[in-house]
Image: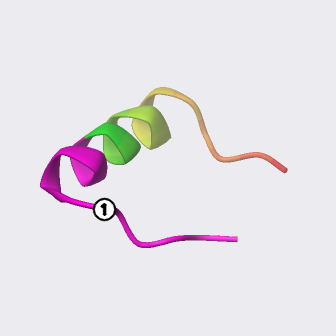
Amino acid sequence: MKMPPLNEQECAVLLHKATEAPFSG
């Protein structure tokens, strides 16, 4: 399930995590 980021910072963190480790589960 994908949820919208709370703010720009959250978006950046999510993007960084997504690029660092592929989504699984």
Amino acid found under the numbered disc labelled 1: Leu
Instruction: Pinpoint residue 10: horizontal percent, then vertical percent.
Output: 29, 48
Extent of the magenta region: 1-12
**Spot occupied by residue 13 in the image (x, y as percentages of width and height):** 31, 38
The one nearer the camera, 14 or 21, is 14
Q: Is residue 9 magenta?
A: yes
Query: Seen from this angle, which residue lies furthest top?
Result: 20
Q: Residue at x 42, y 37 (%)?
A: 19
Image quadrant containing the N terminus = bottom right
Name the residue nearer the viewer: 20 or 3: 3
Q: Quadrant of residue 5?
A: bottom left
> Above or below — where is 16 with respect to 4?
above
Helix, strand, or loop for circle 1?
loop
Provide residue 18's location: percent of width, then percent of height.
47, 42
Q: Which residue is mark 1?
A: 6
Position of residue 3 relative to residue 17, above or below, is below
